[in-house]
Image: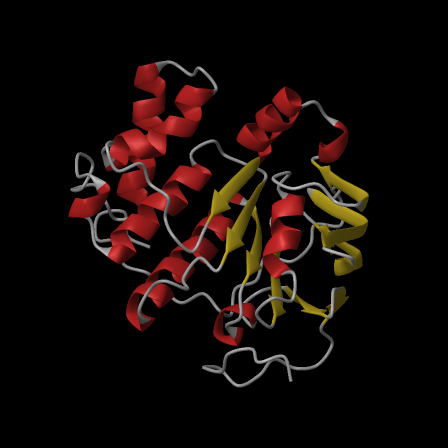
Amino acid sequence: MSKSSGTIYDDTRERVGPRADKSPVLEAREVSKSFRQGPVLLDVLCGAALSVAAGERVAIVGASGSGKTTLLQILGGLDRPTRGQVLVDGRDIHQLTERERGELRNRAIGFVYQFHHLLPEFSALENVAMPLLVRRAPVAEARKAARELLERVGLGQRLEHRPHQLSGGERQRAAVARALVTQPKIILADEPTGNLDGANAESVFGLMLELNRERATSLVVVTHDIRLADRMDRVYEIEKGRLSERLTPPLRRGESYTGT
């Protein structure tokens, strides 16, 4: 991708497979999650297990309400499992104190959501620099890193624009830059293109794949869109709370997951 133009190239043929010589960046071991609704105990996840290597791309698909987002929140330490373990960079994230868990998230995990969640009162540059400022990096260093990433994602001319002055695609590009500014081990993305039109969705997802390849940052994407999932190294499916790796060929490009 050109740094100046922000042009995205389709890299569906270029895969970053598992690195067998490295320990998993992320590992879930028999993760279960239950919620009580009155007298009923609802099992949302039942013994989910997965392992993500350095630089690997993994998609998680499933019908609405299948538990995809709950799993992603547990993987990122934002929610606790009822049972099971989640290891991030070799550490059990749910056995840490709240402060330690926050520090691990800031160092090792980047998050991208369907809605950008940029802070409206701050510029694009300030939003992207924020995770570094949270870890008390020098202001000049944080702004330099943020500027370089925003230029890399094609927003070099939008540094001082606030979110309401950016288009939907530009806001999501800024959100991707914010997720990567700390140089995390892994990006967790929850429907990262679900709020974008077709052209912007392709542009943003292509950007995420390029940055994944360049930086060897692992990528876990929750999506209902098989157009995205079939560009990943591996695809997991959640159905009735159970996670399994898809062994069948991907659906035709352009189809969305229906759970049937």
Q: Nearer the viewer, residue 225 or 151?
A: 225
Seen in the picture, residue 190 relative to 98 is either above or below; the reply is below
Q: Is residue 166 above or below residue 142?
A: below
What residue is shown at x 34% (from left), y 34% (from top)?
Answer: 128
Question: Among all residues in the image, which is located at the extreme front?
Answer: 38
Q: Is residue 221 left or right of residue 92?
A: left
Quadrant holding the N terminus? bottom left
Q: Quadrant of residue 10?
A: bottom left
Q: How is the image coloured?
A: secondary structure
At horizontal 76% and vertical 44% (from top left) the residue drawn is: 21
Residue 60 pos. (x, y %)? 62, 63
Image position of 193 (left or right of 162): right
Which quadrant is home to the C terminus?
Answer: bottom right
Q: Position of residue 208 (x, y in %)?
A: 44, 54
Does 44 appear above or below 250? above
Count of all numbered marks drawn on residues in the image: 0
Q: Nearer the viewer, residue 195 or 141?
A: 195
Foreground residue among 176 and 84:
84
Relative horizontal placement of residue 62, taking residue 91 as reference (left or right): left
**Residue 54 in sight:** no
- Give the residue displayed 62% in from the left and 60% down from the top: 68
188 or 69: nearer the viewer: 69
Seen at 37% across and 44% down, the residue is 117
Q: Position of residue 252 (x, y in %)?
A: 53, 86
Q: Percent x, y for residue 134?
A: 44, 21
Residue 52 visible in the shown view: yes
